[in-house]
Image (spheres, helix red, strand yellow):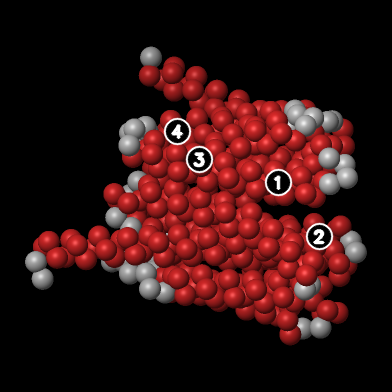
Amino acid sequence: MTDAQQDGELIARSARNSWLIITARFISDFGAFLNMVALSTYVFLLSQSVLHVSIFLACRVTGGIIASVVGVPFFRRFHGRLSLVIFDLIRAALLALLLVLPPSAQLYILPFIALGIGLGNSMFAIGLNSQLPWWVDESRRVATNAWLTSASATGAVTGSLVSGLLLAASGYQLVFATNIVTYLLAGLCILPLRFLVHPAVEKDKQPRKEWRNLVTGLRTAPLLAGMLLVTMADTLGSAAHNVGFPVLSELLTPTTAGKTMGLLLAVWAGGKFAGARMANYLLLQRGIRTERLFFCGVALMSLGFIFTFQQSGVPLALMFIVLAGVGDGLADVSLISRIQSEPERLRLPVFSLMTLLQMTGFGVGMLIVAPFYVWYSPALVIVIFHGIPLLTLTALWLYNRQRLT
């Protein structure tokens, strides 16, 4: 085989891998939001207790935190498509328990199911993002990340909406069965993936050395460290607006709060889709640096949510939330693309650290934010918590300006 034929085969394989990964990500996120809505309401139905729902959600977040800790040694040793397929099968098997066990026993195993699904969701995301450079060539990577963000946003909203429709039409058993099918389909999309290059298996790398290399690597890449710091600060803002959506919807339209919340989420997802496509153009065609686009995206997202929660009418709220979605899409694509540009030894630990920051910050943020909605108006709460990433951005800008002068 000539060099030209080999190059053509690698380009074709990269393109095929790219679309398989995008399809798998859409199906996986669709399934994740399908069961997040269904399982949360199912726990409350069985227990009639908000405490049980809180425990369930805490277990789901804990699963993500565990994944961020064990992800590095696991994917160092067991990289490739098979490990991702196994996590799809584990998630499907856990949900299958709800189809075979009696309701009296389900309440006691639901926290463990939540832990397993949270672990599986995060491990799937860490494995997919960190190994993407082995499956997709560099020229196609930003475009793939943009489509992954678009697919994730679309899967989140459609999963939530379909879950509600299926629950209203046929009940929980059909939702769980549909969810099992989504995870199996995601696994089938992963199976045909083939590496462009074959990485060496690293069995003897010590966890302490991994994290020591991570700290050293971030010291030599201060802008990347700043991006992760802003990501951690932004989790508090994300917790605030997620808790605040039902409150805002009730204030805007007291008689149709559920419909308004669905509309807000759908418009936000549309904005995120548009932001991901814009990031693809700005990074590839305009040559804007990923760090700059990330910081601009976070600022636009936080300001968009702040202005959304200041409104008393639906049209203006929708106008500002689409801006928040655009900023979210810009930031998401920029952050993932920036991390994937790092050497392989640093890429996996950074993705694991990012997951740890997001899961821990979001979980802690949900606990911190709730009392603020009792004490203050939603408009002020969002200013407080989305002001944190804006202040962090300002501090980083001043620090970098002082460092360069």
Residue receiving disc 1: 263
Q: Give left or right: position of 298 versus 141.
A: right
Which residue is at a point 47% across and 63% down the rendered structure image?
Answer: 23
Label 1 crowd (10 A; few <14 / some 14-19 / many >=20): some
Does label 4 or label 1 sit earlier along the sequence? 1
Residue 133: x %, y % from top left: 34, 56
Does label 2 or label 1 sit earlier along the sequence? 2
Total marks placed: 4
Residue that extends furthest to the right in the rendered view of this protein: 48
Q: Quadrant of residue 152?
A: bottom right
Residue receiving disc 3: 275
Question: Could you say whether the residue bearing mark 4 is in a helix, strand or loop?
Answer: helix
Q: Quadrant of residue 98?
A: bottom right
- Is 348 drawn above or below residue 12 in the view shown? above
Which circle, 1 or 3, is nearer the viewer?
1
- Kind of residue sitting beneath label 4: Leu
Does label 3 or label 2 sit earlier along the sequence? 2
- Is 25 drawn above or below residue 191 in the view shown? above
Question: Could you say whether the residue bearing mark 1 is in a helix, strand or loop?
Answer: helix
Do the numbered discs 2 and 1 sit on residues whose CB atoms are within 8 Å?
A: no
Measured in 3D between alpha carbons, the distance from the residue under mark 4 to the one under mark 3, in whole angstroms, is 11 Å
Q: Give left or right: position of 132 versus 48.
A: left
Residue receiving disc 2: 53
Measured in 3D between alpha carbons, the distance from the residue under mark 4 to the one under mark 1, in whole angstroms, is 27 Å
- Kind of residue sitting beneath label 2: Val
Residue receiving disc 4: 293
Residue 183 numbered tag: none
Residue that extends furthest to the top in the rendered view of this protein: 405
Residue 24: x %, y % from top left: 49, 65
Q: Nearer the viewer, residue 89 or 307?
A: 307
Do the numbered discs 3 and 2 sit on residues whose CB atoms are within 8 Å?
A: no
Which circle, 2 or 1, is nearer the viewer?
1
